[in-house]
Amino acid sequence: MLNCSHTDQNPSQQVKTRTNYRPKAHKKIQWFLSGLIGMICIVPSVQATTNRLETFLFDIKQNRIVFVTDKEVEPRGQIITNPTRLVIDLPGASFQGPTVRRNIGSAVQSVRVGQPEPDMTRMVVEFAPEFQIDPSQLRLKSISPNRWFLQLPNSVAKSTLNQPSVYVWPATGEISAGFGWRIHPITGKRQLHKGIDIAAPIGAPIIAAADGVISFAKWDDGGYGNLVEITHPNGSRTLYAHANKILVSEGQQVRQGQVIAEVGSTGRSTGPHLHFEVQLDSGKTAVDPIAYLPQQYILFDVAAK
């Protein structure tokens, strides 16, 4: 059993923790304050095989942190001041390679993911030096044994930067996979994921991210299934894959926000979602779409690390 030492156990400063699944009887999660540090104290279970962090998402729109691991995980966290940092540790979860860091700005200055010691993955949200967090406002909730989210105070969302963007979001839903190298869920091989996946129900609308001409609107044999491609005036292209139904035709002019297709799970897909891709230089270079969309998410897809 893990014993947590502390000097202040004010019940009003404990984080409320909820679960939507029935936990094992020996699990107990509490958030205690100890001077400048608050810690989630957990009775760990022995993992038979190595666990792995799959995704870490800072959802600015919903003002929360969501993280998913390959297997069941029991997170522990702490708040450190001067400057304020929110630290979440995942015992037994691996993360290979150098620490990954994303700069954000405003009150939330950066988010990073790394492995400070063997068999331990650490996620850190760094705030501006003057920014303060009341631990009583934090909410840690388990959606399932390997999927958790931490609800942040409203002051965090209000202080994020709203940067100008080229495109609008092509669908409404949760990001299930980000841009970058990953382990493909079907082939099991490490390969470049050239876009982002937005999970949404079958039939949900897919809209044009910007004005342009439909340059492709049919079945793709390369794994995209029903695919729509828009060529924009600056020569860039956006791709919308795995559609259930295509609602436009090649050569058609479309406007930003126009419905062009419906979300589906066609082609090489494990479930209903939109694969959205941005290609610069007339389709020669795929880039991370997040950099060209209104800032709503900071996503780390780290399964391939």
Image (cartoon, rainbow, N blue to C red):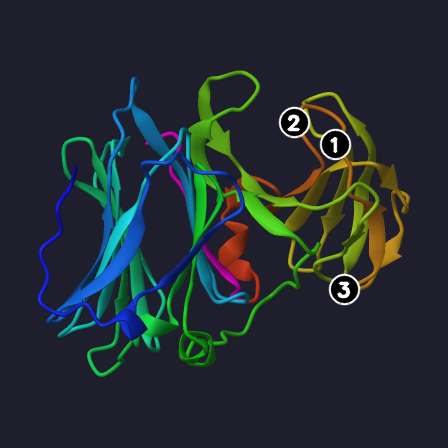
Seen from this angle, which residue lies furthest bottom? 130
Which amino acid type is shown beneath numbered disc 3?
Gln
Q: Quadrant of residue 6?
A: bottom left
CB atoms at circles 1 and 2 under 8 Å apart?
Answer: yes
Q: Amino acid at mark 1?
A: Ser
Q: Residues within 10 Å of mark 2 (few under 14, many from 20)?
A: few
**Which quarter of the figure has residue 71?**
top left
Residue 206: in sight, yes or no?
yes
The answer to which of 80 and 268 lies nearer the viewer is 80
Provide the secondary structure element on which disc 3 rests.
loop
Pick the residue in front: 158 or 6. Answer: 6
> Residue 219 location in percent, x, y?
81, 28
| Residue under label 3 | 256
Identify the residue at horizontal 31%, vertical 58% (top origin).
111
Part of the protein shown in magenta:
295-305
> Residue farthest to the front?
25
Q: Which residue is mark 1?
A: 265
* Left or right: residue 25 compared with residue 116: right
Q: Which label lies toward us, 1 or 3?
A: 1
Q: Which residue is mark 2?
A: 270
Residue in view at x 56 percent, y 67 percent = 294
- Local crowd size for mark 1, using a 10 Å CA cut-off: few (<14), some (14–19), many (≥20): many
Residue 100 visible to the viewer: no
Quadrant where the image shows the C terminus = top left
How many discs mark residues in the rendered view? Answer: 3
Q: Secondary structure at mark 2?
A: loop
Identity, as a three-letter code, of the amino acid under mark 2: Thr
